[in-house]
Image (cartoon, rainbow, N blue to C red):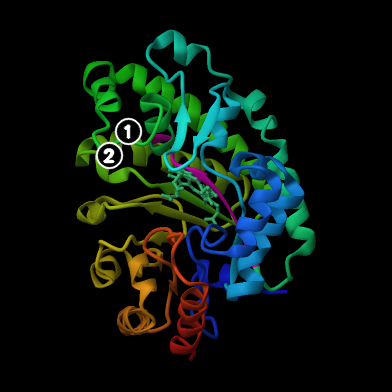
Amino acid sequence: MSKIFVDACLGKETPYSPVWMMRQAGRYLPEYMKVRAEAGNFLNLCHDPKKACEVTLQPIDIVGVDAAILFSDILVIPNEMGMKLEFVTGEGPLFRNPIKNEADVDALICGEEAAVKLDYVYDTIKLIRAQLDDDKALIGFTGAPWTLVTYMIEGKGTKTYNLCKKLIYTQPELMHKLLAKVTEVVKLYMVKQIEAGIDVVQIFDSWAAALEEEEYFEFSWKYMVEICDYLKEKYPETPIIMFPKGIGQYLDRIYGNFDVFGVDWSTPMSLAKEKLGDKYVLQGNMEPCRLYSQEKTTKSIEDIHSVMQGKRHIFNLGHGILPDVPVENAKHFVSECQRISKN
Ligand code: CP3
């Protein structure tokens, strides 16, 4: 059965522009909070295929999105490369022993050995696939190598990225060595996600905007493109979505073998359409805080639709939904996207 979301990724005409939300399985849903409480904490939930499958499916049933996104986290990758991941309540992810030198890079578990340790993710995908309606797509994902190494080097979220940048400007070869190792695991991980049953791949480069233009293309985009080339050679039919957050000023230099470009909320949709709309399907880009107001949500959807006109477009938020958004407003967003873009 054809899936509207996959068709849209491939640039085919669809009855309306499909919609999903980043972080759609998450804390704004009371049903999610209940399953997370049963699991004990967020990481246990990621490691429990039955529960992870359950929360993946919740936004399909509750808010009516056109695609499910695998419930997991980008940071399970460094965890399986041997860095112990913790989540400190209220503060986010933490690696107590971040990468400091070449010996730390050499000690990482790499390649197939790390990829097979993510077996609980593949098990989750198989369970979801068995339960998801045939007309809904399942999105698998990874963090971009650059975004992953920011956590591996800084140990947690950062405002300055100073340790990462110190490496870039003083030991660029070591940074490349680390990025290459992570890229290798990501390639194998994404192939295994595809083989387990995902329909579409999304690569999140959440911290793209931390880098200068040349450095961005050298230390991040290049590795993302390498992942695309690898996946497209093996599975040319599987669409790939690239989401580099906050690099609207570099759009002229975007290249690569992928299908959909995710537009963040700070990049005007009209600019993205002008620069990339012929080459890539565009996804995005409502500012997620508009979800606090139904009226402002509808206005934004109309504005985005007037640019895209229901062609080569997937509705999405320009970043993740926040935990205090009323569920009713998330439902409103989804149904308005489907209504307004109907041909
Ligand atoms: O619904 C979905 O989008 C699928 C699941 C998903 C999660 N994380 C679950 C999650 C996805 C796709 C991610 C990706 C992710 N994780 C990114 C890239 C996307 C982005 O937001 O830019 C990043 C940078 C991370 C790392 C991460 N995970 C951080 C910084 C945090 C803490 C901040 C926060 O929002 O709490 C997490 C935790 C996290 N990942 C939660 C969820 C549902 C909240 C955990 C909880 O339930 O307490």
Please give the residue where the numbered disc 2 appears in the rendered image.
216
Across and down, in percent, residue 116 comes to 70, 31
Looking at the magenta stretch, what is its main secondary structure? strand
Q: Is residue 42 magenta?
A: no
Crowd band around label 1 with a 10 angstrom C-alpha radius: few (<14), some (14–19), many (20+): many
What amino acid is labelled 2 in the image? Tyr
Label 1 to label 2: alpha-carbon separation: 5 Å
Q: Position of residue 174 (x, y in %)?
A: 35, 17
Q: Amino acid at mark 1?
A: Phe
Query: For the magenta stretch, what is the residue range?
Result: 137-146
Q: Residue furthest top?
A: 103
* Label 2 C-beta lies within 8 Å of the nearest ligand 1 atom: no
Label 1 CB less than 8 angstroms from ligand 1: no
Magenta stretch contains residue 145: yes
Q: Position of residue 243 (x, y in %)?
A: 40, 53
Is 266 placed left or right of 258 in the picture? left
